[in-house]
Image (cartoon, grey):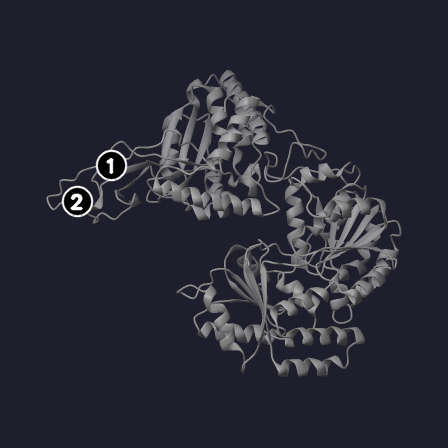
């Protein structure tokens, strides 16, 4: 895209659509095409992600291209060094040593590929160049010889001669990778394979070329994409299996390729900032030669038109914001900021209501996008938005997402927060827009003192069912929220949850000092993709549990999908894990006593696994592909049960929620409930009625009627 005109942008955009819609000629590429279509759909089904916008990337590519050209021309003028500028293409090899082989990515691994990891090694090494500086860009190309995507770097290096570059790169990477192919399957084969055609295939790992055309090379480097292309070497021919003869005189049949095979442009970049795929190295040396002309200008305010999520500015840190003092002016700007095309369901109705009113309760199903409702409301008001969450892990998850969009957009102030004094000073200066805390932290004298000097525009209680669920027991600070809210009488109040029956709604209103006639936005909580089932245990229920797990395990007892098994007691999580281990099934344990919570959560988010957990696990965490949620002990609260079972099938694909119970467990709960409130006893009676009810349709209707 050397000429960034409207017509070329439209053609490129249409080509993306066509290449992701039409199949390809060869069987192996038809298979690849199907896999890439699945990857594209997986990206687009995620509400928080999208393929990169062609119009935006085109403008950005031109901007970067101009900056590169400027550096090249200035360096040539100042150093008079036309011969000391090179373009290096490096097919990525991880680590050091000439025996390393290139890094191949299977199509299904494409969207989970760690771009930062791929860039880290070469960036660290390039910063060691004594005379060289320049730019790196990253993309991946499908190589049909190998049947995988091949990550590679395009590197512009100024200041080094060709000999020094050859010495540098061959020290760290092999110069080429030699392999042979089975010509019938087009896959890498061992030397003993009789179908190998004895012309070795070479992949050039390092390619160093002098730059002759500044404009062409700067534009080429800026094409960040994932693409599929056919590269069949001229000596490679296919041999049909039935044509192999004993005398080894083979009839070779050439493969004809369609002329229009070009690229898919399937951007995996939706999940990373541009700084992950475009990077300046040895910037101090660059500044020495050309001054500050190439320095990327920083934005002091929000510019959602120019910086959508997923392709942030060309710098290591996200840009700053000024929304504490200067709110956004309309709902459309909020959409652009979060890179959404439109609001879904009645999100905008909730936002518009909260702009004009004091408080509301939002009861909407999991994956509705409840957070966007208070994001949009707060961002259109000056001042700080305080968000109260039940779990520290949930706080860090939410704050991390916001701070990837803008620097210091949100502050997590918890018992684990480091450098508290420094962060409180920044908070007092109005440098944050969102403050995330647990109920217990609202009693902290330091933070109360800082908040008293700030403009508090909004107080949000997320996962508001916890007020009723935990407020009477081990989280008494939940019942003190009213005292905190009273300190900020001008603030808007919003409570959000996926379930809240009438008694829970009443508790939320009372604790949050809401009027009795407060507006409640009730959504359709039906999760049609989840199949609910109740099983009465036989003996200890373990054999029935194994029957439920068996269809979701492969031949090696590895889970084909992510599975959560909830237990009411900590001892059950540990004991059940040991029993599964004896059956050759690995699992993780998550409860209040373990010390490796972060490791378990990281594994849960990244891989298919089984997690044995107590109730708090997974709350508010966006893990879309949980295929099965099991409650291995009876429940005493349908709202809590529905919350936890709703962690299945967030990608809208078929999933299951199975509840086990025994008469012994029910009798034990009834005994303990005698010391509970009347409201708790009523909830237990509803749960018992649900578990003992016959007929799945009748039971499902009963469940939905009693959680809202």
Provide residue 301's location: percent of width, then percent of height.
72, 34
Residue extending furthest left? 247
Which label sits in the foreground, 2 or 1? 2
Q: Is residue 114 visible?
A: no
Q: Is residue 549 left or right of residue 624?
A: left
Given contact means CB atoms under 8 Å apart, are the residues at marks 2 and 1 in contact?
no
In this rendered view, identify the residue nearer to me: 416 or 592.
592
Can see residue 658?
yes
| Residue 185: % across, % down | 29, 45
Q: Indicate which disc residue 237 carries.
A: 1
> Which mark, residue 244?
2
Quarter of image, res 179: top left
Assign a secondary structure to mark 2: loop
Residue at (68, 76) in percent of width and height: 688
Dot 1 alpha-carbon crowd within 10 angstroms: few under 14, some 14 to 19, many 20 or more: some
Q: Quadrant of residue 426?
A: top right
User: Which callout, 2 or 1, points at the residue further toward the start of the chain?
Assistant: 1
The percent position of residue 483, horizontal first and vertical second, equals 86, 60
Question: Above or below — where is 584 with respect to 312?
Answer: below
Q: Residue at x 56, y 41 (%)?
A: 270
């Amino acid at each position: 895209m050397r000429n960034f005109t409207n017509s070329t942008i439209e053609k490129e955009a249409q080509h993306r659509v066509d290449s992701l819609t039409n199949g390809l000629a060869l069987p192996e590429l038809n298979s690849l095409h199907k896999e890439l279509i699945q990857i594209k759909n997986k990206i687009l089904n995620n509400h928080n992600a999208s393929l990169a916008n062609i119009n935006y990337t085109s403008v950005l590519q031109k901007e970067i291209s101009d900056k590169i050209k400027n550096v090249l021309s200035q360096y040539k003028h100042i150093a008079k060094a036309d011969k000391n500028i090179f373009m290096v293409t490096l097919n990525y090899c991880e680590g050091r040593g000439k025996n390393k082989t290139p890094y191949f990515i299977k199509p299904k691994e494409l969207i989970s590929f760690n771009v930062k990891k791929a860039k880290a090694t070469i960036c660290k090494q390039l910063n060691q160049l004594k005379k060289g500086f320049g730019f790196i860009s990253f993309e991946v190309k499908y190589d049909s010889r190998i049947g995988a995507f091949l990550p590679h770097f395009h590197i512009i290096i100024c200041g080094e001669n060709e000999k020094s570059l050859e010495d540098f790169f061959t020290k760290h990477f092999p110069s080429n990778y030699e392999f042979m192919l089975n010509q019938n399957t087009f896959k890498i084969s061992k030397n003993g394979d009789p179908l190998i055609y004895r012309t070795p295939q070479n992949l050039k790992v390092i390619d160093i070329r002098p730059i002759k055309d500044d404009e062409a090379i700067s534009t080429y480097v800026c094409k960040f994409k994932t693409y599929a292309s056919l590269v069949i070497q001229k000596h490679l021919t296919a041999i049909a299996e039935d044509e192999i003869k004993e005398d080894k005189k083979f009839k070779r049949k050439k493969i004809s390729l369609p002329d229009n095979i070009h690229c898919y442009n399937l951007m995996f970049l939706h999940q990373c900032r541009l700084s992950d795929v475009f990077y300046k190295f040895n910037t101090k040396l660059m500044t020495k030669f050309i001054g500050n002309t190439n320095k990327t200008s920083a934005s002091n305010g929000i510019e959602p038109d120019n910086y959508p999520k997923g392709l942030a500015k060309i710098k290591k840190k996200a840009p700053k914001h000024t929304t504490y003092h200067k709110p956004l002016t309309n709902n459309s700007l909020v959409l652009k900021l979060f890179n959404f095309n439109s609001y879904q369901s009645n999100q905008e109705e909730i936002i518009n209501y909260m702009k004009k009113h004091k408080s509301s309760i939002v009861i909407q199903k999991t994956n509705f996008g409840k957070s966007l409702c208070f994001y949009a409301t707060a961002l259109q008001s000056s001042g700080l938005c305080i968000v109260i969450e039940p779990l520290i892990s949930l706080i860090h998850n939410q704050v991390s997402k916001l701070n990837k969009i803008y620097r210091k957009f949100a502050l997590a102030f918890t018992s684990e927060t480091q450098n508290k004094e420094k962060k409180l000073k920044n908070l007092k200066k109005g440098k944050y827009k969102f403050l995330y805390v647990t109920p217990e932290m609202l009693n902290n004298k330091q933070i109360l003192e800082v908040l008293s000097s700030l403009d508090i525009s909004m107080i949000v209680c997320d996962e508001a069912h916890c007020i009723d669920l935990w407020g009477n027991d081990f989280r008494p600070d939940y019942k003190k929220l009213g005292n905190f809210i009273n300190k900020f009488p001008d603030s808007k109040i919003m409570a959000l949850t996926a379930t809240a029956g009438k008694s829970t709604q009443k508790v939320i209103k009372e604790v949050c000092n809401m009027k009795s006639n407060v507006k409640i936005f009730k959504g359709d909580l039906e999760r049609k993709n989840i199949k609910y089932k109740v099983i009465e245990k036989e003996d200890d229920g373990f054999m029935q549990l194994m029957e439920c797990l068996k269809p979701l395990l492969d031949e090696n007892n590895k889970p084909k999908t992510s599975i959560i098994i909830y237990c009411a007691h900590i001892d059950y999580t540990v004991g059940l894990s040991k029993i599964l281990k004896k059956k050759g099934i690995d699992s993780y344990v998550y409860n209040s006593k373990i010390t490796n919570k972060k490791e378990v959560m990281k594994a849960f988010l990244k891989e298919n696994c089984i997690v044995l957990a107590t109730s708090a696990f997974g709350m508010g965490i966006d893990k879309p592909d949980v295929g099965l949620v099991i409650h291995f002990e009876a429940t005493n609260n349908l709202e809590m049960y529905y919350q936890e079972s709703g962690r299945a099938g967030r990608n809208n694909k078929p999933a299951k929620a199975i509840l086990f119970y025994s008469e012994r467990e029910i009798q034990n709960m009834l005994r303990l409930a005698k010391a509970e409130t009347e409201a708790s006893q009523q909830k237990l009676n509803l749960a018992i009625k649900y578990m003992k009810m016959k007929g799945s349709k009748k039971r499902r209707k009963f469940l939905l009627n009693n959680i809202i």
